[in-house]
Image (cartoon, rainbow, N blue to C red):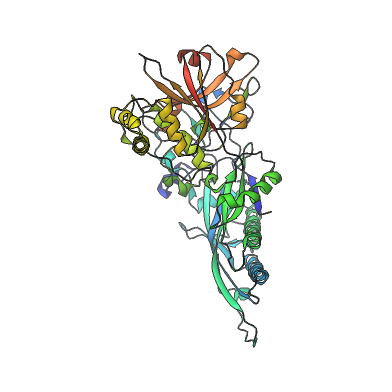
Amino acid sequence: MVVMVTKEVACVPSQLERRELKGFDAEGGLWIVNVKKKWATWLLISLQPKSKLGEENGIPQLPLDTKDLLFRIKGGIELEGVINKTDEEGIKAGFSEAINELIAKVNSQAFGLSDLESPLYIWPKTHTSTRSSRLREDTQCKAILKYVLAEVSELLRKASKKKFLRVVPLKVINLEIHFEMTRPEHLQKIVVQHNKMPCIHFKLTLPIDVVVFANPEEPWGKVQDQFVEAVTAQLSAMDKCIQRYTNGKTVPMPQAFHFELPEKTTLTTVIYPAGISDANLEQQRKELHAELGLDNKPFLRRTMAYLFPSDEVKSLYLRNIHKYIPAPDPDEFKVSLVHGLYTFHHCLQDYENDSDWGGLYRCLQVVISWFNLQGYIDKPVPTLRELQNMLSAISYKFFSHVIMKEWLEPEAMNALLDIFNISCTTMEVQANKPMDFSSHFEEQGTPVVISKFVIFSEPEAYILLGFAVNEDPKASKGLILNIMYTGIDDFSWIIEKAIEWKGEEFWKELDDYGLWLPQRPEGV
């Protein structure tokens, strides 16, 4: 099975420049940052045990599952070999032999790692480095923070000192792979052979992307051994990928993807072949689900891959902001939450003046983002104006609604959902009728759209992201994402103003309301 599970870790923050590292404890201690001005896609927000969520000194907190350092090892390794037989089995054998030779190189003294931002160079096999006098075998590995740049969230860099959330960014140490050409075992011999049989010489670059987590107090020598083992394991996994997906004379390029799994503080690395669609990888994912004990929902699609610090600039919108607020006490409530990933969209975003009429458009963006990030649809999240153009193209009736900037009616909402092949169960609910959404989140896991539109009152729209129930039906709580939020895209402001667990009063204030419960397609 092409899978590697790393040591447990909670979350990875984003990039911080060298000049901003002065707040770090050089010995690897935690750096506490108070957040005000930015969102927190990669923040680790600390609390006590995982099962208990609450407050300490009035500061909301979430679980912190690890203090480990994350080493990310990347680089292109040249794979070179000879194919003696040009049928499919011969091609597979040639690539397998070449990868075995590459594994031997990784396990030799020629294998090295470097930090691009510093003069540090490491030879993991011999436990030596350009700082050998300071980084000895028995030195705690957190000492490396004195010599390399630890990457943390760029969002944190711009955060103010407002004491709203206490957050702990995990340190990410990026290392690049090298091979030293002057090592005796790396010197290549020239062999002249006379062989009348045809053969093919091949050369390509394998994109290695390995993650290794280490306790800050682990001996540096042991951690270096883990580097060698992890790269070796990924090469073996890439060989399995090539053996599985080579078709005739077409050999796939193996690529590494890292995933967070539910109820685990673990990153799981899966090797997928480039150029093969997620639909054609369904069988491999089913095998992985069985091996990892995952249920029948998407977890390992490429669109769900973990975002590392360097990926932060590619994401324009906040993801999964509900992760950063305390949930109801699990000893008192059964809590069911949205599954997977989504992005937060709200009124006045993207320089649009839609606070009076754009709520349901924004709800659509959240729902579409969920289906896109789970890999169910290929279409990206449309802008508000793109949604309006789509609606105008359907019929003249909808065109007039767009021109008049009117609140979306159910018929128009359903028409836009149909464009994205999103099926919904819809219903109208009276405010005094209790609803339990637990089964929806357990079975479907999709964000639910709530729309209040009553004549002579201001329309409202919300996204329901979770539900908590206990023995008293009146004590139930819903996790409400306020799409009508018109503030700035600022993490602390959004946590304060745009998302909250709300009780019975919220539903009563809605009067009558409409619901769209998106139904996810089958498959993993």
Residue 281 image point, x, y percent: 60, 51
Q: Nearer the viewer, residue 190 or 273?
A: 273
Regarding residue 68, the answer to whether it shows in the image is no
On the rendered image, what quadrant is the C terminus found in?
Answer: top right
207 in relation to 303, above or below: below
Residue, far top: 432
Q: Nearer the viewer, residue 389 or 154?
A: 389
Q: Residue at x 43, y 34 (%)?
A: 416
Q: Nearer the viewer, residue 297 or 406?
A: 406
Residue 418 image point, x, y percent: 46, 36
Q: Residue at x 51, y 51 (%)?
A: 146
Q: Nearer the viewer, residue 121 or 471?
A: 471
Residue 338 image point, x, y percent: 56, 31
Q: How many marks?
A: 0
Residue, far bottom: 194
Regarding residue 373, the answer to whether it shows in the image is yes
375 in relation to 55, above or below: below
> Which of the 4 quarters of the picture holds residue 346?
top left
Residue 45 image point, x, y percent: 53, 33
Q: Is residue 231 left or right of residue 480?
A: right
Q: Is residue 205 left or right of residue 392?
A: right
13 in relation to 134, above or below: above
36 in relation to 7, above or below: above
Q: Residue at x 59, y 77 (%)?
A: 200
> Which of the 4 quarters of the picture holds residue 208?
bottom right
